[in-house]
Amino acid sequence: MKNEKITIIGTGYVGLVTGTCLAELGNEVFCIDIDSVRIENLKEGIIPFYEPNLEELVKRNIKEKRLFFSIDLAPAISQSEIIFITVGTPAKENGEADLSYVEKAAQSIAKNLRDYAVIVVKSTVPPKTAKKIEGLIKKYYQGSFDIVSNPEFLREGSAISDFMKPNRIVIGRESKKAEEAIRKLYEPLNSPILVTNLESAEMIKYASNAFLATKISFINEIANICERIGADVEEIAKGMGFDPRIGDKFLKAGLGYGGSCFPKDVRALRQSAGANGYNFCLLKSVIEVNSNQRKFIVEKTEKLLNGLENKLIGIWGLAFKANTDDVRESAAIEIIKSLRKKGAKIKAYDSMAEENAKKILPKEVIFCQNPYEAVQESDGLFIATEWDEFKKVDLLRVKNLLKSPNIIDGRNIYSPNEMKKLGFNYICVGR
Ligand code: NAD
């Protein structure tokens, strides 16, 4: 098999994982970023974020001379047959996806193209963006090229295995030649490949994320009813999950969805629907339920602690989910801010996400070296991220260190019965 020369524009979670995995498959990959510090570090094998197994893979492929990092895209573009755009698409104030990074990347590609290439939009973008990008490139480059939409479905925390063993690969295209090039690239992964037009491929990504977010908001509403009727949402989810039409994934009640994708993609899909003359009313509720979920748990905490003014609360977990250091749109961060607004003082612990959280939390938040330090002399413990580490702690020690044995478990990691037996005042979600 002929291996390809590939350029990746944007070396974040998606770009770095895509580039590294494509190098691991035998291709020659040039990873480009505008962040020169990030690139210098990557050349030494220093990864800008935590992702299991990524460092080892990056180092191996640098050594094997299949993976290269640079801020200079001209030499990379001029020799690549396939160019991926993997830059961020954050939300604007009104929820719309900010496409300025994608557009800038496309412009830089166009100005440096010398020969036919397949330009692949992997960033999550609203339907019709690939067509726009095609138009933009044509302004600067008169030669031949093809555009492909190839949304990414990897999850932070399991990004490498998600990329290497995807449950589907979506190729949106207009040209057969481009389809063949991308098919060939992914052939070694032996995954189902769905070929569509550009708009459908773009929509599949938004629809998938919005559907998963809807599942989370749905189970959170069920949890809220469970609390009122004496039912257990974990049992409800289990009972529902046996039905293959429903499935048992993404039915975990808790603090709602967070992270760099779901919140912004749900809002962007709603905004994009509106811009195309359709009111996606279901998503309005999905967003509202998600935001209420965090308000409700803060209210429950306030009630359990008899007010929050001057109460010291230990927070376990700052990342938006376990196995990542990403704190973008993390429930933990939002909850800490709400608790502080109501007068609480915060001691927080998350060994992995501490550095990122420090950049966005007020300086009054005290960061701890271990979970026990965070509960020492605290009026209560709030569990905000479901790290495995918290499931294995010595709960009696926790009880002895706390000023009062109050635990608010936003992730349902303990059994209510066990906690009662141990003498905790324990509240959780939907049980
Ligand atoms: P990120 O913020 O981690 O990384 C983006 C990178 O692009 C940064 O390093 C930035 O410096 C770089 N960049 C910006 N403009 C550039 C330019 N003109 N040239 C070169 N580099 C540039 O973003 P991410 O989390 O990897 O997400 C990228 C896209 O993939 C988004 O659209 C996101 O929605 C989507 N996505 C993300 C995930 C995820 O789990 N993070 C999963 C699937 C899809």
Image (spheres, rainbow, N blue to C red):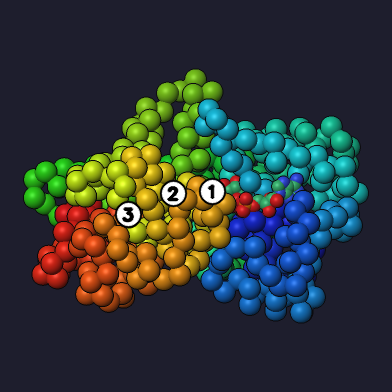
The image quadrant of residue 298 is top left
Residues at marks 2 and 1 touching, judged by CB atoms closer than 8 Å? yes
Decide if residue 73 is in sight here: yes
* Residue, disc 2: 333
* Residue, disc 3: 312
Residue at x-position 56% and y-position 66%: 50
Give, as a three-letter code, the residue at label 1: Ile
Q: Earlier in the sequence, mark 3 or mark 2?
A: 3
Residue placed most toward the observer, 57 or 21 = 57
Task: Find numbered disc 1 in the image and state the secondary structure of the residue it sits on.
Answer: helix
Give, as a three-letter code, the residue at label 2: Ile
Task: Find numbered disc 2 in the image and state the secondary structure of the residue it sits on.
Answer: helix
Q: In this view, does 16 lie to the left or right of 192?
A: right
* Residue, disc 1: 360
Decide if residue 183 is in sight here: no
Counting from the top left corner in percent of width and height, residue 63 is at 76, 79
